[in-house]
Amino acid sequence: MAFSLRQICTFPRMCGKLPAIAVSGPFGAVKEQSSGLYAQHMAERGFVAIAFAPLFTGESGGEPRRMASPDINTEDFLAAVDFLSVQENVDTERIGIIGICGFGGMAVNAAALDPRVKATVASTMYDMIKVSEEGYFASENTPEQRMEKRKVLDTQRTRDFRNGTCQRAGGVVDPLPDDAPQFVKDYHTYYKTERGYHKRSGNSNDGWNTIGCQSFLNQPLLTWANEIANPVLLIHGEKAHSRYFSEYAFEKMTGKKCNGQSMTDGNKEILIIPCASHVDLYDDEAGVIPYDKVEEFFKTNLK
């Protein structure tokens, strides 16, 4: 169960010790999708940059495939920092991370755990614990609803063990039902078309194991976000269905409510991109990813 080092995206052709950034996400994606794009942009701007697929996905190790865990997925970021820390051209005091979608939450969690992470960006963040335990917008937030989820997953665990295989939960729904919410249509436009499809991506194909995210029903994630000493930048689209996850994280870190507005409190910032959706921050399709802002943030805080 090894963190693969085949996930190197690119290194800028410069001499001396450089600041470095590790990138991962979205949740269910692989390094060849959004994280590789972000890493490429950061490398072009003078950072050593790597994009990695988390354990159990893509070209990383881990069996059975397509499993997830808030602990292990946070450790993925720490392993990336380990790797960057021993590179001859990396300044170990200038390492940052970028987490996209569900790995935005993992990145914030890693920042709370590891002071080596000197600056953190979470883009179009999901809190996978919150959505697993509560459903979207707390629509499944009762003890009875959580118990029903546990029972379904436990039944599937027994079935998987008996069969010796893991049932997949399915990736992004295809074909789209007529009544699909807009954000599901947006996911389809990215993961199921030439825009973002990749053969190793769970979201593009058959998804996680049905039991793959069971631990998210009973694990912490942002418990000590208020104790993150180093800078954090949260970026989210104004129209994103998921915007409330970044707003929740900002409040956890600062005690302040941003109410859908860009806001700075100390070295914590939330940037709301006007009119942008969740998926608009996955790639360059809509041209709204604020790479200049991300570059400025890291160059200010990794110096």
Image (tube, rainbow, N blue to C red):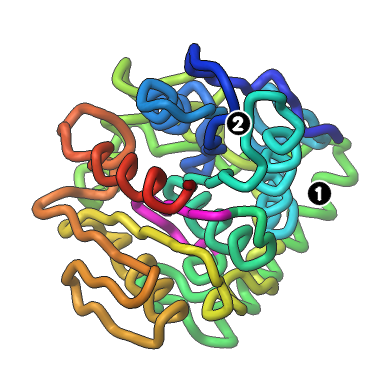
**Badge 1 is on which residue?**
159
Magenta-colored span = 118-128
Q: Nearer the viewer, residue 125 or 116?
A: 116
Residue sitting farthest toward the top: 13
What number of labels is visible?
2
Q: Residue 155 appears at what percent x and percent y?
A: 76, 60
Picture disc at residue 52: 2
Q: Nearer the viewer, residue 111 or 56?
A: 111
Query: Which of the 4 image quadrants contains residue 125?
Result: bottom left
Does residue 180 appear anywhere in the picture? Answer: yes
Q: Residue 34 appears at what percent x and percent y?
A: 41, 31
Instruction: Identify the amino acid type marked 2.
Output: Phe
Crowding near the residue tagged with mark 2, few <14, some 14–19, many ≥20 C-alpha atoms within 10 Å: many
In the displayed structure, would residue 148 be above or below residue 167? below
Residue displayed at 48% across by 47% down = 302
Residue displayed at 20% across by 79% down = 259
**Separation of residues labelled 1 and 2 (CA atoms):** 32 Å
Residue displayed at 59% across by 87% down = 143
Query: Which of the 4 image quadrants contains residue 172?
Result: top left
Tell which circle, 1 or 2, labels the residue nearer the N-terminal end.
2
Q: Residue 54 appears at what percent x and percent y?
A: 65, 38
Q: Nearer the viewer, residue 36 or 159?
A: 36
At mark 2, the secondary structure is loop
Q: Is 126 part of what is drawn in magenta?
A: yes
Q: Residue 49 appears at what percent x and percent y?
A: 52, 28
Q: Quarter of the image containing the N terminus?
A: top right
Instruction: Identify the amino acid type marked 1.
Output: Arg
Q: Is 167 part of what is drawn in magenta?
A: no
Residue sitting farthest toward the left: 275
Cβ–Cβ under 8 Å for marks 1 and 2: no
Residue displayed at 71% across by 63% down = 215
In the displayed structure, would residue 189 be above or below residue 99? above
